[in-house]
Every structure is written in C-alpha cells, then in structure tokens.
Image (cartoon, rainbow, N blue to C red):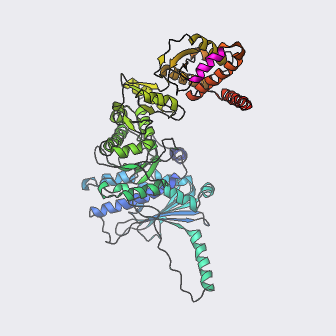
Amino acid sequence: MHQESGRVSVSTENIFPIIRKWLYSDRDIFLRELVSNASDAISKLKRLAEMGEAQLPEDEVFRIDINFDSDAGELIITDNGIGMTTEEIRKYINQIAFSGVMDFVEKYKDKAAEDSGIIGHFGLGFYSAFMVSDQVRIDTLSWQEGAEAASWQSDDGMEYIMAGSEHDQRGSKITLKLSEEGKSFLNSSEIRSILDKYCNFMPYPIYFHDLSAERKAAEDAAKAEKKADGEEPVEEKEQLPVNNVSPLWLKKPSDCTDEEYKEFYRTTFKDFREPLFWIHLNMDYPFKLKGILYFPQTDNVYESLEGRIKIYYNQVFVADNIKEIIPEFLFLLKGTIDCPDLPLNVSRSFLQNDEYVGKLSSNIIRKVSEKLNKLFKDQREDYESYWHDIGIFVKYGMLRDEKFYDRVKDIVLFKTVDDKYKTLSELGEEIYYTPDAKQQVTYIQMAKKRDLEVVIMDHELDNHFMSMIEYKNEGKKFKRVDAELGGKDSDSDRTEAYSTLFRAVSGIDKLEIKVQSLGEESLPAMILESEENRRIQEMRKQFEKMQVKGEDAMDIDSMFPLQQTLIVNEDNPLISRLHALNELPAQKARAEEIAGQVYDLARLGHGSLTAEDMAKFLKRSTEMLQKLAEQ
C-alpha cells in the first residue's frame, strides 16, 4: 500500500449534534455562554482602549441587556462591546471552535494584551444557543471606524445567511427564536433564576427586561392615568442591574468590614444565621485565586452539601463543589472561589490538568489549616466556642486528608464532661470517654472519684476518629468509661452463688460475674465491657447489615461473641438482701425477680438493653410496684 498523508476532515453535520446535546449537558448553560460572550466583547474593547487602539468617551458606560418577549417567543442578548465586521463573523462564527479570544490575545500579544478578564477560549459557546432555538440571528456593528453593520442568521447552525444590518449601535445583538422545547421551560422567573445562578457576579451590569410584562404594565398605567386625570404621574423607578459587578472577594481583605462579610454571606447563601468566621483568599502566586470561605453554624451535624462552595472563572459561575479543587471534607464550608487560571474544558464545566488542580487544592487546604491554627493560638477562647460547629469538619478532614491531619493534629479539641476543652497533648496516655454523658452518668461519677478525666465522643464519626488517633499516636489508648470501674475485687465466697443466680435470670450460661466493693451509694450492679469488645460489636453491626439469610448466612454470634462482665456491688444493701433471699428456698422466686430487675437496671445504665427486653423490664417494674403497694 502506498504511503498517504493528509488532514482529517470534520463534518459539521456530525459534530454539531454533539455540541448541542453532549458538550453542554444542562439546558440553561446557553444563557451563561451568550452572556459570557457579551462580557468578553466588552472586555476586549476596554483592553483596546487601554492600549490606545480604540477611543472611547470618558463617560462610556458598558452594559448587557437581556430582553425576553414571551408573546413573540424571543430572547435577545445585547452588548455595547467590540462588535464584529463581516470578515470577523466569517472567522469566529462560521468556523466552529475558532476562538475569538485566542485570536485577540495572539494579535495583540506584543502590546501585553493578556487574556485576564476574558472568559471564552474555545469558540463553541455561541452554538449552545441552538439548544433552545429554532433560529439564531446576529446583528453587529464593529468598533472600527467606518465599519458597516452586518448580520448572520441560521435555523440549525449548519446553513446560514449573511447580509447587511440596520443595527446602528456598536456591539452585538443576538436574537433567539425559541423552539417549543425552549418555550416550555423558559419564562421570566426561570431566566432570572439562571442569571442569578451563573451571572450574579459578572463584571458588567446586566439588565433584564420582561417585554411582555412591561407592555402589560404600560397598558395598565395608561388606563389608570385616564381614570386619574389631573393627578401627579407616578415617577418611574430607576432599573437596577440583576448582578453585583464588584463581589466582595475582589476587595482587599484589609478593606472589608465584618458586616460586609456577613451581608455577602447572607445574600449569597440565603443563610441568615451568622457565620462563625471566614477566610479571605487573595493569592497571586503560584496562581491567581480570590475567594471567601465561611465556616457556618452547623450544630456539628451533616447538612446538604449542594451548592456550598461555588467556583467562578473571572466572575462567571462554573459549578458547585468541584471535588478536584475542593476536597470533599471542605464541602462542609460555604464559600466562593474565583480562579482565572482554571484549566477548564470546552464546556467550562470540568477541569483538565490534574497536576495544576492538585496544587490549587493543596494551597486551599493549607490556607484553611493556617486560619484554624491562628485562631487556636491567638483566640483560643473563641476557637473553643466554635468547636461545637467545626469539630465534625476538622475530624472529617483529618480522616480524609493526610496533610490536613498533620497541620491540625495539635489543635483538635476534646470536650470533657465538665465542659472543658483539651488538646490531645493535654490528655493522658489513656483517654476515657463516653458516648452518652447522661446515660452513663453513674460510670462518669465513679471515674471522677478516681480523678479521671472523661471526654465526650458522641458522633458516629468518632469511632473511626479514635482508631486513627491510636494508629498515629503510639501509646495513646481510648477506653470507654464503662471499661473499668476501679473497684476492688472481693474475696467473698458469695461469687459462685451470685454467678448461678444472675446466669439463670439472664439466660447467658457464660456470663462473667465479678463481685467488687464499689461503695454503698453506687448501683447494685453495673456492666463492664472492654474497649476491644465494644469495637468488635461495632464490627458486628456492620456485618449484620450485610447479612444474607438462608443457608449461606454467617454465624454472627460465633464471629463476634458478646463479652460483658456483670459487676455485683457487694456494698449495696440491696445486694446483701438479695443474697439472703436467695439462701431461703421459699424466697427463691422472689430473689430471681429482684435479680432480673437488678440485671436489667445494669444493662439500662450501660445502654445495652434491647427494645424487647426494655418492654419486659417495664412490665416487671409495674408488677413489683403493685406488689409493694399491696403490702
């Protein structure tokens, strides 16, 4: 076969459906693209003026107007930017994927025409208009002196008609004749919502006009004016742009007040609880990045993560929670990040260049950890007051990110049952904890008598967190407060009698029984469970969730045997009375009834009484009270 070389051809008929259906997966993206193009057109003209290439009036006011006419089924986007000549239409519109931005930067590169502030790069965004349109028309007038207005029109994006135009204002007007699909979801409210989502912080004022509604309002006003002839006409209110052209993240942190930060948080996230604190990101090296990250009030619980950290590209919204930039654990924060160096793909929705994005992510994590360390060092009291809300975030981050763990390991706090906060270094090698301070109050009181400090670990994340701390800190060991009671083992000969009695009432032949001296004021009996067994039971719960019934079912009881010890307090008067009753054959049933109640009380205090056994316990309690009342 002869060697052959050539150029790969691209068929518009084949690639265009891909652009419309797959490149932009969300229908509302088209408006972001068209408004972004309008913003680019203005930025190009401003850049030319700064370079002395274009002359503009001193009072020049740039703007973007969006007119929606539901009666006519039209949506019109107008700007007063750079405009296009007929030749530029041929170059930028008729050639798919020819980027006007890249061409502009290349043309003026010798005059330092950086592309900062200009959004588009791939030359495809315009064609997203056909996602909602049966026809798209461009009317445009270039900034160049002597330029003639031109038009471009297409019904499908493949065949077009170019001609002159009566457009007499510098800039471009894009008119969309909406398709039935476009009409079905686009209305005044939806357009405002799209603008709020994608264009809320674009750098030039955007004005939205609902032409159908304005016509109706004008007609109603005319009728009212006839009825109220002679009255003072109502003064029309000045229309305000729908966007904020100067978001707070663009300001220097030193120029922002606390109230400005709080107001920006309220309006951006519709959360009227004040944020705890915030981090103002303002980086120029190794990449440009600005933004504000807020630590919200969370009550230490998970909330919806949707839309919590918004990513912008030159003030244009790109997406929520891009995991390549923002690690998952940072989604518990709320904020805005604007990075003009983002390596976006052609739809401006996903990222390229993993190495660059990885460095960006690492720098954000570093900034967050630096803020936390500074708060701990300079404002420890405030930091402790925040811990109830930020504790879950810090622990989750330590579990998920090794570098974050290393940066904050010395400032992670543990709340004690006495409402004090301790760091890991301020606690002993053996750390006693409780998952429920109210339920385990008796155990806690006994621990206090032994001068032991007890911390509260009551979140579902804490089991994993404690295991990680033990793994990374040799010598540190967590023990639940009911793992040791501190009593002295008795040398009484009653142990065997108590063992026989409590094994009978519990139905557990291998129940371990210990008789200890715990003091008269302590409960008659308590459950002791080793920390190792508690963790085994946590594993048991996970296996039970995966259990498959039938012949292949696992023997959960054999795999994860329950190993608890019943500590009988020989100092308690009830236990002494119980022993006496148990020695009398006629009182055997009475002794077993009391022993069953004592055992269930111990399980209740330990937190291991099942729902079924709780029902039996309550029934027995009622019966015993009735007998007492009848005596």
**For this view, does 550 lie left or right of residue 61?**
right
Q: Quadrant of the C terminus?
A: top right
Residue 139, placed above or below residue 416 = below
Total labels: the figure holds: 0
**For this view, does 230 lie left or right of residue 163?**
right
Residue 352 picture quarter = top left
Farthest residue to the right: give it.
Answer: 630
Residue 561, placed above or below residue 430 = above
Q: Which is more toward the observer, 284 or 161?
A: 284
Q: What main secondary structure does the magenta stretch of the protein show?
A: helix
At 57% from the left edge and 89% from the top edge, which residue is drawn? 230
- Residue 223 covered by magenta stretch: no
Q: Quadrant of the N terminus?
A: top left
Q: Position of residue 24 (x, y in %)?
A: 51, 47
Q: Which is more toward the observer, 200 or 569?
A: 569
Residue 433 visible at all: yes
Per the rendered image, the range of residues in magenta is 571-582
At 49% from the left edge and 74% from the top edge, which residue is drawn? 237
Q: Position of residue 303 (x, y in %)?
A: 52, 43
At 33% from the left edge and 40% from the top edge, which residue is drawn? 366
Q: Position of residue 596 (x, y in %)?
A: 65, 22
Farthest residue to the front: give it.
Answer: 631
Q: Position of residue 187 (x, y in %)?
A: 59, 60
At 57% from the left edge and 22% from the top edge, which residue is drawn? 540
Q: Which is more toward the observer, 613 or 93?
A: 613
Residue 364 picture quarter = top left
Residue 510 visible at all: no
**For this view, does 566 lie left or right of residue 471?**
right
